[in-house]
Image (cartoon, rainbow, N blue to C red):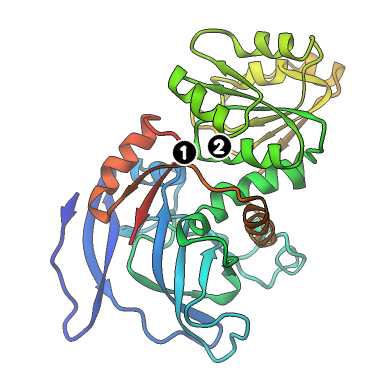
């Protein structure tokens, strides 16, 4: 990663990691944010959690409408430094997690609390507007959620995309209940480790897939009841054996073509598959006969609601659920962190600590 020593004349500056081109990053300096507007807060970034959306942004995505350079970082927490005159529920010193999209706050979905259906601005931090990989920034106060005292900055940094996404998938969309069985694909990923813990916290039986024996032991410590090394056996066949041929009630899917057909074959009659991502491609075959004959439900899920962040941080604090941290790195190591995430050489989350 390049280091740029450029400065702004007669201005205080902050460090920022900017994307300047495809797979081209620069650690540079940008202007210090001004005093917050009436509805804003000024924050010191404390931790940023790396995600696949950061990898996609770094690699360059044809559908991403944006201007470069852009500050990366889609999921983060920070400490409130100052609040605008209209902000009443936050104060300096509070640790907050940031919603990952700059929504309009005014359209009907936003007013109804369905923030991820915003019909207005819908800009995503770190993807098509400047993100969180910088020392300080201003942000609308309505996009900041105060963390419970029991959560530190690193745990709070994993609430918006990692745990918030899983909360929305499992409970808003898939309606997972105690006593049901769920298949969590890629249990060693950031959201996979979160899904195992949240599913177990409500009394579900968890089957999960991983790609190595080392990861098998690690997910076992998170509470997974059955673990399948997908490199050694077909996971759908093993799922059928585990469930006495019945199949699972819910599949937590985020891998895409590599697991899609097997995920559908793993479902019980009337089962629900919920998906939030596709890290192995965007096109997959679906057996339509199986879909309607077995009365399966396929549910797309994107991001989360702001309310999900509040709920899941409360759940994390009450049940002592913590994100699984693979590595804590500095701003200088962002490129290596993205490369490891791209190559799946991680277990849990890579955190950039400020």
Q: Earlier in the sequence, mark 2 or mark 1?
A: 2
In-front residue for pair 255/48: 48
Q: Give the residue displayed 55% in from the left and 92% down from the top.
A: 85
- Give the crowd class for mark 2: few <14, some 14-19, many >=20 residues within 10 Å: many
Measure how far apart labels 2 and 1 are at the Cα level. Answer: 6 Å
Q: Is residue 303 left or right of residue 354?
A: right
- Give the crowd class for mark 1: few <14, some 14-19, many >=20 residues within 10 Å: many
Q: Give the residue displayed 49% in from the left and 86% down from the top.
A: 37
Residue 193, which numbered label?
2
What x and y, as percent, mark residue 237?
A: 67, 8
**Circle 2/circle 1 CB separation < 8 Å:** yes
Looking at the image, residue 67 lies above or below residue 350: below
Work out which quarter of the rendered image holds the C terminus and state it. Answer: bottom left
Q: Is residue 61 visible?
A: no
Q: Give the residue displayed 73% in from the left and 64% down from the top.
A: 113
In-front residue for pair 134/110: 134
What x and y, as percent, mark residue 149?
A: 57, 67
Residue 179, which numbered label?
none
What is the tally of numbered marks visible in this picture?
2
Regarding mark 1 in the picture, which secondary structure is present there?
loop
Q: Give the residue displayed 55% in from the left and 37% down from the top.
A: 193
In-front residue for pair 174/107: 174
What x and y, as percent, mark residue 353?
A: 35, 57
Regarding mark 2 in the picture, which secondary structure is present there?
helix
Report the residue marked by disc 1: 348
Q: Is residue 320 left or right of residue 346?
A: right
């Amino acid at each position: 990663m390049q280091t740029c020593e450029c400065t702004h004349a007669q201005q205080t500056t902050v460090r920022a990691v900017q994307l300047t081109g495809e797979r081209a990053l620069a650690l540079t300096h940008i202007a210090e944010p001004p005093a917050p507007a009436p509805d804003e807060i000024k924050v010191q970034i404390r931790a940023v959690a790396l995600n696949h959306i950061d990898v996609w942004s770094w690699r360059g995505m044809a559908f991403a409408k944006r201007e470069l350079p852009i500050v990366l970082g889609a999921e983060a927490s920070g400490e409130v430094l100052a609040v605008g005159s209209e902000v009443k529920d936050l104060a300096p010193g509070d640790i907050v997690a940031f919603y990952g999209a700059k929504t309009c706050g005014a359209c009907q979905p936003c007013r109804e609390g369905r923030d991820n259906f915003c019909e207005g601005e819908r800009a995503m931090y770190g993807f098509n507007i400047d993100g969180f990989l910088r020392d300080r920034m201003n942000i609308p106060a309505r996009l900041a959620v105060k963390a419970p005292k029991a959560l530190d900055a690193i745990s709070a940094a994993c609430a918006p995309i990692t745990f918030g996404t899983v909360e929305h998938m499992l409970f808003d969309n898939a309606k997972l209940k105690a006593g049901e069985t769920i298949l969590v694909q890629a249990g060693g990923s950031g959201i996979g480790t979160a899904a195992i813990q949240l599913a177990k916290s409500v009394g579900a039986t968890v089957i999960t897939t991983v790609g190595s024996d080392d990861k098998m032991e690690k997910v076992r410590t998170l509470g997974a009841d059955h673990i399948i090394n997908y490199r050694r056996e077909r996971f759908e066949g093993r799922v059928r054996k585990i469930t006495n041929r019945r199949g699972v009630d819910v599949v937590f899917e985020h891998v895409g073509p590599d697991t899609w057909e097997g995920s559908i074959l793993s479902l019980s009659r009337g089962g629900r598959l919920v998906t939030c991502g596709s890290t192995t491609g965007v096109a997959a075959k679906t057996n339509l006969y199986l879909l309607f004959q077995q009365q399966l439900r396929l549910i797309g899920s994107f991001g989360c609601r702001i309310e999900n962040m509040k709920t899941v941080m409360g759940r994390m604090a009450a049940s002592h659920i913590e994100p699984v941290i693979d590595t804590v790195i500095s701003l200088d190591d962002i490129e290596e962190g993205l490369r490891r995430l791209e190559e799946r050489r991680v277990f849990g989350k890579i955190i950039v600590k400020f």
